[in-house]
Image: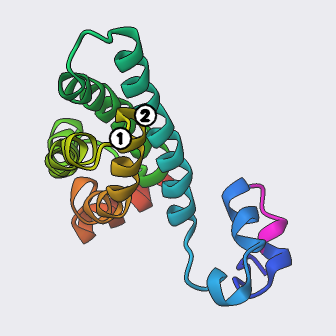
Amino acid sequence: SGARSTSDPLSIVESTKPVSRAVALLPVSIRSRVQPKHLKFALIGIYNTLFGYGAFAGLHEGFPHINYMFVLIVSREISVVSSFIAYRLFVFKVKGAVVSDFMRFWLVYSGAMVANLIALPFFVEIIGLNVLLAQAITMILTVISSWIGHNHFSFKRAATEAESESALEIV
């Protein structure tokens, strides 16, 4: 009687976890493929995107005499720290290895940064978009690559390490 059926939405809705309740509201065909980690990643991703865009826009508008590419680099580094903390605490919930996790996390975002350094001036200088609109478009384009990188690289744990962490959480 302790196991809950994932096919019964009421058993999920009764859960005290908000993410589980959100999953229960999805159609059955989608619910069977969506894990709470996916929703948490999306919610934290929305926060991180808004935070990152806010940092970029705030620095760009607050210091209009500074080149938008320099603003991009500074705002991205600020955002990476915030993102790392949020993903580590609320999505992947890993323990230990903070420095190596951060280095892998930073590498994933470095790939996104390179794409951003190419796309932003393309949209601004060649296409003629406003800097803030161009950055909004560019940020949207990097979300999927971030999920793949963080899920399979940044916070990846060996199976035995993940099992021992799970066992410790039970105790």
* Residue kind at label 1, given as amino acid type: Gln
- Please identify the quarter of the rendering in which residue 87 is found: top left
Local SS, label 2: helix
Q: Main secondary structure of the magenta part?
A: loop
Residue 112: in sight, yes or no?
yes
Q: Answer left or right for 93 relative to 84.
A: right
Find disc 1 in the rendering and name its residue.
135
Q: Residues within 10 Å of mark 2 (few under 14, many from 20)?
A: many
Quote the CA–CA distance across marks 1 and 2. Answer: 8 Å
Residue 6: where, in percent of width, then height? 69, 83
Q: Say whether marks 1 and 2 touch (CB < 8 Å).
A: yes
Q: Is residue 13 magenta?
A: yes
Look at the image and tell me in which quarter the N terminus lies: bottom right
Numbered range of the magenta stretch: 12-16
Say the numbered circle drawn on residue 53: 2
Local SS, label 1: helix
Residue at 47% x, 52% y is 91
Residue 73: where, in percent of width, then height? 20, 28
